Amino acid sequence: MRITLLVSFFLCYYYCIYITHASPNCLEDQQSLLLQLKNNFTFLDRKQLYSPIIHEIISRSTKLRTWIKTTACCNWSGVTCDNKGRVIGLDLSGEHIIGGFNNSSSLFSLVHLQKLNLNDNYFNTSIPSGFSKLEKLTYLNLSMAGFLGQIPAEISQLTRLVTLDLSFISYSTKPQIPNLQKFIQNLTKIRKLYLDDISITSQGHEWSNALFPLRDLQELSLYNCDLSGPLDSSLTKLENLSIIILDGNNFSSPIPEKFANLKNLTTLRLSYCGLIGTFPQKILHIESLTILDISFNLNLHGSFPEFPLNGSIHSLLIGFTSFSGEIPRTIGNLRNLFELDLSSCRFYGTLPNSMSNLTHLTYLQLSNNYLSGTLPSTLFTLASLEEIWLPFNQFSKFDESINVSSSVLKALSLKSNNISGRFPTPIYQIHSLIFLDIAFNRLNDSLQLDGILELKNLIALDLSYNNISINVNVTNVGHISLPNIRYINLAS
Ligand SMILES: *[C@@H]1O[C@H](CO)[C@@H](O)[C@H](O)[C@H]1NC(C)=O
Ligand SMILES: *[C@@H]1O[C@H](CO)[C@@H](O)[C@H](O)[C@H]1NC(C)=O
Ligand SMILES: *[C@@H]1O[C@H](CO)[C@@H](O)[C@H](O)[C@H]1NC(C)=O
Ligand SMILES: *[C@@H]1O[C@H](CO)[C@@H](O)[C@H](O)[C@H]1NC(C)=O
Ligand SMILES: *[C@@H]1O[C@H](CO)[C@@H](O)[C@H](O)[C@H]1NC(C)=O
Ligand SMILES: *[C@@H]1O[C@H](CO)[C@@H](O)[C@H](O)[C@H]1NC(C)=O
Ligand SMILES: *[C@@H]1O[C@H](CO)[C@@H](O)[C@H](O)[C@H]1NC(C)=O
């Protein structure tokens, strides 16, 4: 008897503990606050509707539909509780909520919240200042929430924030943070700060110094924030920075050499920044660097250094700058390279054979440079390469001996080069091609239509302005078909 009691006591003890951990019982007040929140939201739970606010068909919510009285709120989609049944996380991203949310909302009574994500909605009301009541927040994500008006200063009271994302918070007017220094001075725990498309309008040393209290900052994104220059080297005092995104601000300055001291840097994005001067080559030697985008800085000069073995770079985007020089043989050391864009620069010389070692390369964009020489046949054997864009260069020869059997190439453009002689027949074997442009070269050949017909996936073909004739001599005209073709240019 005694033993049975004891056993059942322990059974119950462990069983009950287990139940509590698996799905904590939702506290009654938490449940009713969430239900009020839901009841006041305007969202779609039945069918798809046309929204006059966003001018498009919007689909229905998925998470809010699981919020029903008869189940415990800790099991609802988007809701996270602690083991006392208090709501500590709320993820309502992508719920297509189109209104019914303001400062008097019951959301601001969920004071245990640590994580709140309202990304991708259309609240269409001014940004409530009530967020400051959620003192325990460590994560606040209001990106693309579709609010109106200004960023409330009260957000700067949320001193426990580790992640703050206010990117593209408004779809209509661009909100402002008039004093960045004041706004973030007490947010010293922040590691990820995303303020894209908010007008900050301050000068280089001002906004860089304003960030200085954020000693743990790892990710900084200030895309299109109306910042002005110069790009200040004081930013590099934040040694933990691994992601820096500053595209679309007009700095009119060089990139300070000190950026190369950021030993944890993985992503540096500075496109459309009006950068000038010479790009510090040492940045390309940062071991952790995976993404570099400095494209569309027309007056930024530079050239490539020798690349060390096993570089981690996977995206190298330099297009529309004043970079020049040769592409070094050591580019083959960038074994992780996935996309390379050097379009509209001033590179010359030949493409190094070592590029055959770039087995992850998917996108090669070298349009509008001064590259010459034979096209290396090894390019066509790269297992991942899907697009080769080489128009407006000075390539003169296409290696006839290339083996294209393993090619996965979808787009090949050799427009406006200097290629002469016969049409390169190996191209017929690249059956994956959907876009082929060899216009404006000096090819001199008479083609059999059958060859071109092997390219069953072609959508666009341009052979114009060569000396090419096509011999339509197929026995069964019924078989002539390129099922997807939409655009053929055979002018001249
Ligand atoms: C807040 O929203 C509720 C529900 O949509 C509405 O009844 C109330 O008038 C609003 N309050 C303010 C101050 O706008
Ligand atoms: C929310 O809805 C409840 C009824 O469900 C109402 O009593 C309350 O005033 C509303 N609050 C807000 C802020 O809209
Ligand atoms: C904000 O939420 C969206 C959607 O969940 C996510 O893609 C984005 O990365 C989040 N931002 C941050 C800084 O975590
Ligand atoms: C930051 O904290 C200090 C000290 O608590 C306070 O005096 C100041 O007003 C706070 N700044 C902001 C912008 O909230
Ligand atoms: C480069 O990577 C290869 C394969 O992972 C490895 O064997 C080699 O030691 C590495 N070389 C250097 C210099 O890190
Ligand atoms: C490819 O890399 C290997 C190993 O680093 C090297 O020996 C070889 O020469 C490279 N291939 C070319 C064509 O440079
Ligand atoms: C083009 O090819 C034909 C036939 O092979 C040849 O007679 C002609 O000279 C070539 N024209 C040029 C410009 O190379």
Image: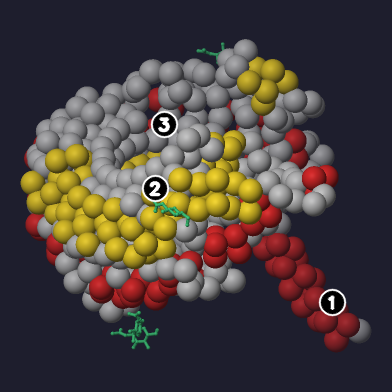
Q: Residue at x 61, y 27 (%)?
A: 97
Of circles 2 and 1, the one toward us is 2
Which of pointers 1 and 3 lies earlier in the amino acid sequence?
1
Q: Residue at x 48, y 32 (%)?
A: 144
Spot occupied by residue 274 in the image (x, y as percentages of width and height): 18, 36
Along the viewing direction, whichever of 101 and 433 lies nearer the viewer: 433
The image quadrant of residue 349 is: bottom left
* 6 w.r.t. 91: above or below: below
Q: Callout 1, which amino acid? A: Ser
Spot occupied by residue 133 in the image (x, y as percentages of width and height): 42, 33
| Residue where numbered disc 2 is placed | 441
Q: Which mark is residue 149?
A: none
Q: Quadrant of the N terminus?
A: bottom right
Q: Residues within 10 Å of mark 1 (few under 14, many from 20)?
A: few
Of circles 3 and 2, the one toward us is 2
The image quadrant of residue 337 is: bottom left
Q: Residues within 10 Å of mark 3 (few under 14, many from 20)?
A: many
Q: Is residue 170 visible?
A: yes
Q: Which mark is residue 8?
A: 1
Q: Residue at x 79, y 26 (%)?
A: 47
Spot occupied by residue 465 in the image (x, y as percentages of width and height): 43, 40
Which of pointers 3 and 2 lies earlier in the amino acid sequence?
3
